Image (cartoon, helix red, strand yellow):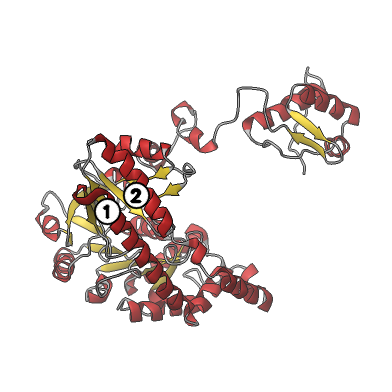
Amino acid sequence: MELAIALNNNSSKSLHQQLYEQIRQAILSGRLTAGEKIPSTRFLAKSLSISRFTVTTSYEQLLSEGYLETVTGSGTFVCKQLPDDLIYSNPIDNIEKDNCSSIKLSMYGKTLVNIANVPRITEPQLEINFRYGTPALTEFPIKLWRRLLSRYCNTNLNWLDYSTEPNGYQPLRAAITHYLTRSRAVNCVPEQILITNGTQQALDLILRLLIEPGETVAIENPGYLSAKIIFETQNIQIVPISVDNSGLIVQELINYQPQNIRLVYVTPSHQFPTGAILSLPRRLELLNWAQQTGGLIIEDDYDSEFRYSEKPIPALQGLDQRDSVIYIGTFSKVLFPSLRIGYLVLPKSLISIFTRAKWLNDRHLPILEQQVLTEFINEGYLESHLRKMRSIYDKRRQTLVNCLKEHFGKSAEILGEKAGIHLMVRLNTNFSDEEIIQRAAKNGLGIMSANPYYLTTHPPGKFIFGYGELTEMQLQEGIKRLASIIICKH
């Protein structure tokens, strides 16, 4: 390993002192991490064109002060226990100190700094975590996926080159079209499919191309937090539209008067986070609103594959006759989150401009993963995996619901239990949401309040329980611990 060290022969400081200070700073700033091996004195001396004695003198000072340690026969390493209290901080945390920076931010940057509830990149490691959105990764057919990867790696090398298809690998777009038309009654052809790097990129493209700053969009209340944040960064006026047991209350959208709403974002097949399903009459009512006003509808169909007690309702896009709906889908929930492959189903009039914008945004997604996913769909592996996961998630869902009823009784109102891999629960308790979260964490439990997902005030006590990645035993133990925390105050 080479170290980027800049020595100044004209400095008043000796070379060994300069080298000592730069290595010490690299350790304290985290550029050199605890336990990391550093170059030998011979190698570094040759790399920097200085004497080995100079390097040895610097290393000896660092060793004596506890920054470095030697392992006989292995070399010199950064000490695992640093001597100073100046342990380097998480670089992500430093982002929050922008008010100390002399670099001027753009309007987008300033907006992002001031937005609350931006999700943390890291989260505490807890024994049982009811986080939402994570599938049962241990059930994924990894051997099959590895075999498909090997097949395409060994067949040819075109996956190493640039793609000539900025809108996505054509066979994958054809496979997605066949899948959507059959399973979701989406009305599309492969040319309307644009492969994206997940839902966030899809939303970003839509807003950049179709919405001007200052224009008004409507979102569900409560609703998907990341969508709200993306809207806020574009300096868009946001109108919250309430949700009940039948989904978005479209009449509120119709009654909104101050100015025209250009776009509405909805999760009709499994409303996030309440789990409500937009009824057929309201779907038709929403489409009529779009036709009458010229507004657009973003349909985020993020996990409609997992339904347990009712027949799936066709996608909103399939009912649309006026090109009013832009459909978003993703494979991160049905397969695994690191597979950053999502897609848009676009009205034909928008294909060209979205393809250009996508090319400028990231050129193209990795071809290899697209090739493997294509075969995974075409050979029936996707549908087989979905059947298996529906059965597993249904058992976990029932376990969670039964445990909540057993330990909380009427003190827990369960919402949205008929679809997806999470449900929302209203707990009747004297504890605040923050108290429950803190007490749960002390008992090895991770739970999430629904509060950040509301744009308006609401009664406390609503929590989101993800169950996709938890075993039935973990679900039972988790709810048992949570009950011991909450019920003790009654």
Q: Is residue 348 left or right of residue 66?
A: left
Displayed quadrant of residue 297? bottom left
User: Residue 404 placed where, x, y %?
Assistant: 28, 53
Among the two numbered marks 1 and 2 on one chain, the one whose residue lies closer to the N terminus: 1
The answer to whether the residue labelled 1 contacts the one labelled 2, judged by CB atoms less than 8 Å apart, is yes
Disc 1: CA contacts within 10 A as few (<14), some (14-19) or many (>=20): some
Disc 2: CA contacts within 10 A as few (<14), some (14-19) or many (>=20): many
User: Residue 130 placed where, x, y %?
Assistant: 39, 50
User: Which residue has dot 2 on it?
Assistant: 479
Residue furthest to the top: 12
Task: Please tell me how many numbered marks the rendered image carries.
Answer: 2
User: Residue 229 placed where, x, y %?
Assistant: 34, 47
Amino acid, disc 1: Glu
Distance from disc 1 to disc 2, alpha carbons, whole Å, reads 9 Å
The residue that appears at 29% across and 40% down in the rendered structure is 486
User: Which quarter of the rendered picture does the N terminus lie within?
Assistant: top right
Along the line of sight, the residue nearer the viewer: 256 or 262: 256
Q: Secondary structure at mark 2?
A: helix
Relative to 430, does residue 178 appear above or below in the rendering?
A: below
Displayed quadrant of residue 287? bottom left
The residue that appears at 47% across and 59% down in the rendered structure is 337
Amino acid, disc 2: Ile
Q: Is residue 214 visible?
A: no
The residue that appears at 32% across and 41% down in the rendered structure is 484
Relative to 418, does residue 30 appear above or below in the rendering?
A: above
The residue that appears at 40% across and 75% down in the rendered structure is 387
Along the line of sight, the residue nearer the viewer: 409 or 460: 409
Q: Which mark is residue 406?
A: 1
Q: Is residue 360 visible?
A: yes
User: Which quarter of the rendered picture does the C terminus lie within?
Assistant: top left
From the viewer's perspective, is the residue at label 1 or at label 2 nearer?
1
